[in-house]
Image (cartoon, rainbow, N blue to C red):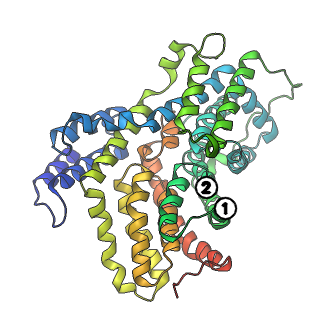
Amino acid sequence: MVLLALCGCLLALPTPAGLPETGKRVIAVALLAIGLWCTEALPAGVTALVLIVALVLTGAVADFRDALVGFADPVAYFLIGVLTLGLAVQKSGLAERIAGFFLRRSRGSARSLYVQLLLTFPLMTLVLPSATTRTGILVHVYEQALELAAVPRQSPLASAIMMALNSINRLASTILMTGGITPVVAAALIGGSVGNIGWNQWLVLMSVPYFVLLAVGSAMIYVIYRSGFAQRLPALPDEPPRKLEPKEWRTLIITLGASLLWLTDAWHHWHPAIPALIAWILLLMPRVGVLTWKEFERDIGWANFFVLAASLSLARALKVSGASDWVAGLITAAAPAFQGQPYYVVATLMIVSVPVRLLIPNITGFLATTIPIAMAIGAATGVNPLICGLAVMIGGDAVLYYPAQSVSSLAVYERGYLTAPDIFKFGVWMTIAAILVVLLVALPYWAAVGVALRVQ
């Protein structure tokens, strides 16, 4: 009721100068949806439906079709394909096999199990660049490992492992330009202003800051959930290697085939949803796949689809109504005060972009809104626009305040190991970490590799 009252008050208030009336209505609906997602006052899928209805009833969108535009976005179907891959890994027995391997190598140590998970992130990125795909598979593997070790679902150890999958795994992808939506969109936006950024140049610029972020984030999770790492896990007896079952072989071949298509997208130029849909079809095909349609219907976690599609509709409404441009435009207010103080400019850009990240559900909308403005501010204040663009990208990419902000986060959140407040609190810590890493690590490192902070 409090959230509804707040939404009503915002709708009743006079429209601020420069903000269209429809923009005010979209912001009110966005704050209602974010509040419901963060507090878990309603199931996440129900909140998604409330969001769609609210967009229509408040007049934030022109008609009902505009409110449903996210359901036609290929990313929503990419999500279902990836979740199907993860489900197949579980149902075929591959998840149990891999989980048993990790548990045996951990030798009863919860710390070893956690470190093994962290090491898989950068290593698997080379084979599976998409964080969503890695998460969709690894969440089943480690859920199986926790079950084999009889670790309670709400225990600190289970929360630590799932928080790493939720918040840290994504960061490994951005090290590669081809690692997902974030680096692709950011490289295109930044390159449009300062010249094309090559794959190798991106790797050089991103490797050190993101590896430090991975280490800092992993350490924070360890400290927050440190009580869970003291427990001993049951040591599984050593077993001779077992041959892969036919179901496991088929799942492995289909998964690797999809990965190969994702890795070679520079040649065929298919949308990432196409390989995901091909894998989805094959996994459900009789005598080829490993899932029945009934298993798919029952276990896929449809709330993820509705939350993602609704958040995409909200992101489009924020952009079309002018609301996101108005919010991002507020960032420029402090820029003249820091003329000649590049560190303050970068820090200010990152701090004031936090509410923009909170308001805009998907990372693409955030990047499209903030990077052009950040680079313009950099040019106006004598700060390298490339650095300004990269800084706000890292600030937005490093954090998640609620599950609807990431496809991979939805895949973890749906399993029930983490609550929305857990994700929000860790997002606040990662916000602080991202700002400090950019200021204390990235800026000196970029200067060392020839990217000057000031524009001469």
401 relative to 170 in the view: left or right:
left
Label ID, residue 203: 1
Residues tagged 1 and 2 counted as in contact (Cβ below 8 A) = yes
Residue located beneath label 2 in the image: 177
Mark 2 closeness class: few <14, some 14–19, many ≥20 residues within 10 Å: many
Question: Please, which residue is most extreme toward the top here?
Answer: 287
Q: Where is residue 49 drawn, in percent x and y?
A: 29, 33
Q: Which quadrant would residue 134 be assigned to in this image? A: top right
Tell me if residue 359 comes above or below residue 383 in the rendering. above
Of residue 378 and residue 151, the one placed in the foreground of this image is 378
Asked which secondary structure carries label 2, the reply is: loop
Q: Is residue 346 visible?
A: yes
Q: Where is residue 70 drawn, in percent x and y?
A: 36, 38
Of residue 242 and residue 323, the one placed in the foreground of this image is 323
Question: Please, which residue is most extreme toward the right here?
Answer: 240
440 relative to 413 in the view: left or right:
right
Q: Tag 2: residue type?
A: Met
- Identify the mark nearer the N-term, 1 or 2: 2
Mark 1 closeness class: few <14, some 14–19, many ≥20 residues within 10 Å: some
Please give the name of the residue rendered at 32% of the width and 32% of the height, measured from the top-left corner: 46
Tell me if residue 16 comes above or below residue 447 in the rendering. above
Q: Tag 1: residue type?
A: Leu
Of residue 339 and residue 353, the one placed in the foreground of this image is 339
Q: Which quadrant would residue 158 be assigned to in this image? A: top right
Asked which secondary structure carries label 1, the reply is: helix
Of residue 374 and residue 226, the one placed in the foreground of this image is 374
Please give the name of the residue rendered at 61% of the width and 10% of the height, measured from the top-left corner: 286
Q: How many marks?
A: 2
C-alpha gap between disc 1 and disc 2: 7 Å
Tell me if residue 69 comes above or below residue 5 in the rendering. above
